[in-house]
Image (tube, helix red, strand yellow):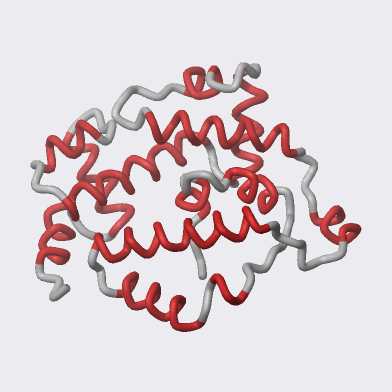
Amino acid sequence: IYIPLDAFLMMPNISELGIALLSGGVFAVPAEFCGAEMVAAWHRDYRSNDFERAEISRSEINTVLRRALHRGLEPLLARDKVTALEPKLNPWHLRHVVTMIGHITENLGKRLSNSDIAAATGLHENYALNLFSGTMGLPIQRFVLRMRLLQARAHLIEGNDSTSRIAAVSGFRSTSQFYHQFRTAFGMPPNELRRQFSRSPF
């Protein structure tokens, strides 16, 4: 199962697992928590292009991970090998990255400057920004844009708000900027994506 990193880090109540994975950990979920039939169902839901089905699948995946984390996950690699895979960033640093991600996702409709995001950690701005880009593999403002686009896409699929309203609540400064960024990211204008999902048979 592939879950985009930003979507995974936003899943509730599994921050410890997120930090462990970002530190180079490799784990297996017990087979009884995640059988082949369940994985096949998640795949069908994802491929259905039905937003509600996809959301239910994400919720179920989150529950499986929470249950596995509560039970206790053993690393697949020996401890010395896991240590060798760990980046220079330690869990304390990674918690700051998760804090910045949380601040971003909770304030997408507002102006988000680098200094505002870094301030959520209490660290020096340049240090916080370097932590973020080094961990996530992209600059912080590109991550903000990605999250705004994902939020806008969700609003288009599940709601009836106008595109101008969706652009505003997702933090875009103008409708024209929203259209340009959306088409660049998804290969079609917002209204076309909405039409495609409205024709879904599910």
Q: Is residue 93 left or right of residue 173?
A: right
> Image height check: is 68 above or below 175?
below
Q: Is residue 152 left or right of residue 25?
A: left
Q: Is residue 118 left or right of residue 188?
A: right
Q: Nearer the viewer, residue 18 or 150?
A: 18
> Image height check: is 110 above or below 47?
above
Residue furthest out toward the right? 80
Q: Is residue 111 left or right of residue 190?
A: right
Quarter of image, res 79: bottom right
Q: Nearer the viewer, residue 141 or 101?
A: 101
Residue 75 x %, y %: 77, 62
Give the residue displayed 28% in from the left and 31% down from the top.
171
Quarter of image, res 127: top right
> Image height check: is 135 above or below 128?
below
Give the residue displayed 44% in from the left and 22% down from the top.
113
Q: Nearer the viewer, residue 48 or 17?
A: 17
Residue 158 x %, y %: 18, 53
Residue 202 x %, y %: 17, 73
Q: Nearer the viewer, residue 104 or 67?
A: 67
Give the residue displayed 53% in from the left and 21% down from the top.
120
Give the residue displayed 23% in from the left and 66% down from the top.
50
Quarter of image, res 136: top right
